[in-house]
C-alpha cells in the first residue's frame, strides 16, 4: 500500500497531467514547426495571474490545492487514515480553441480508464469533477485571455497498517 502526504498527492496529480498534455506546436520565422512542453516553465504554482503572464506568457496550466481534510479513519485498522483534497486546475490560453484543446486533454487524463488506473496505482484516486467554468480575463492584458477552471476531488491514503 502507498501512503502519501499532500505534497506526494499533488506531485502525482500534476505528473499525470504533465505526461498527457501534448506539446504545443508553433511556427518559426521560416515556417518550420517547433514545439515546447507545457511541463516546463508553463506550469506555474505561485504568484498573481498578471505577474505569471508577464514572466511566462501563454498558455499556462496552474494547479493548486483548495482544501484538504481527513475523511476516513480506522476503517480497516486504528492507524488507517484517508485524506480528501480539492485540486483546482486553471487553463489559461490566448484563444478559445487553444483553451478547449488543453482543457480537453486535462479532462481525458481523468476520464480515460487506462490513465485513471495508472494514477490510482500511484496512490491517488480521482473521485470526481466538482465544477467547471469558463471566463475571459481581458482586463489583465490588452489581449483576451481565456480561462477554464476545473475543480477535482481526489482521495489518497495517508497512513495505515
Image: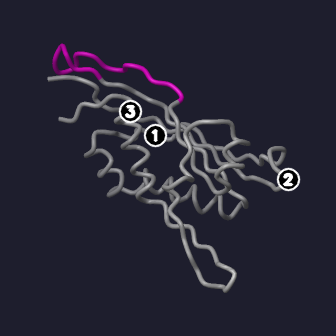
* Lower position in the chain sequence, tag 1 or tag 2: 1
- Alpha carbon separation for disc pair 1 and 2: 35 Å
Q: Assign a secondary structure to mark 2.
A: loop
Q: Is residue 35 left or right of residue 20?
A: right
Is 161 placed left or right of 43 in the picture? left
Query: From the viewer's perspective, is residue 112 above or below residue 127?
Result: below
Corner quadrant of residue 77: top left
Q: Residue at x 65, y 63 (%)?
A: 98
Of 40 and 149, which appears nearest the observer? 40
Q: Which mark is residue 142?
A: 2
Nearer to us in this view, 141 or 95: 141
Label 3: which secondary element: helix
Q: In the picture, residue 4 is in which quadrant?
A: top left
Cα separation between marks 3 and 2: 36 Å
Quadrant into which the C terminus falls: top left
Can you give x and y, in whole percent of width and height, for residue 91 in the image?
61, 50
Query: Which one is closest to the eye, mark 3 or mark 1?
Result: 3
Find residue 128 and name its label.
1
Mark 3 and mark 1 lie on one chain; the one further toward the N terminus is 3
* Of the pair 12 and 47, the residue shown nearer to us: 47
Nearest to N terminus: mark 3 or mark 2? 3
Q: Residue at x 24, y 31 (%)?
A: 3
Q: Position of residue 115 (x, y in %)?
A: 35, 55
Please say whether residue 145 is one of the residues in the magenta stretch: no
Q: Does residue 153 lie above or below 41 as drawn?
A: above
**Which residue in the structure is indicated by mark 3?**
7
Residue at (73% x, 42% y) in the render: 50
What residue is at 32 percent from the left and 32 percent from the top?
156
Amino acid at each position: 500500500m502507498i501512503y502519501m502526504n499532500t505534497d506526494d498527492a499533488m506531485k502525482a496529480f500534476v505528473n499525470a497531467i504533465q505526461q498527457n498534455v501534448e506539446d504545443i506546436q508553433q511556427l518559426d520565422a521560416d515556417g518550420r514547426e517547433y514545439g515546447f512542453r507545457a511541463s516546463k516553465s508553463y506550469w506555474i504554482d505561485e504568484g498573481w495571474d498578471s505577474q505569471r503572464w508577464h514572466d511566462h506568457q501563454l498558455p499556462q496550466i496552474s494547479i493548486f490545492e483548495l482544501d484538504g481534510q481527513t475523511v476516513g479513519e480506522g476503517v480497516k485498522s486504528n492507524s488507517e487514515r484517508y485524506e480528501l483534497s480539492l485540486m483546482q486546475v486553471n487553463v489559461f490560453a490566448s484563444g478559445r480553441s487553444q483553451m478547449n484543446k488543453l482543457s480537453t486533454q486535462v479532462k481525458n487524463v481523468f476520464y480515460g480508464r487506462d490513465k485513471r488506473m495508472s494514477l490510482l496505482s500511484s496512490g491517488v484516486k480521482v473521485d470526481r469533477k466538482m465544477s467547471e467554468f469558463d471566463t475571459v480575463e481581458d482586463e489583465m492584458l490588452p489581449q483576451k485571455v481565456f480561462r477554464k477552471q476545473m475543480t477535482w476531488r481526489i482521495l489518497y491514503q495517508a497512513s495505515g497498517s
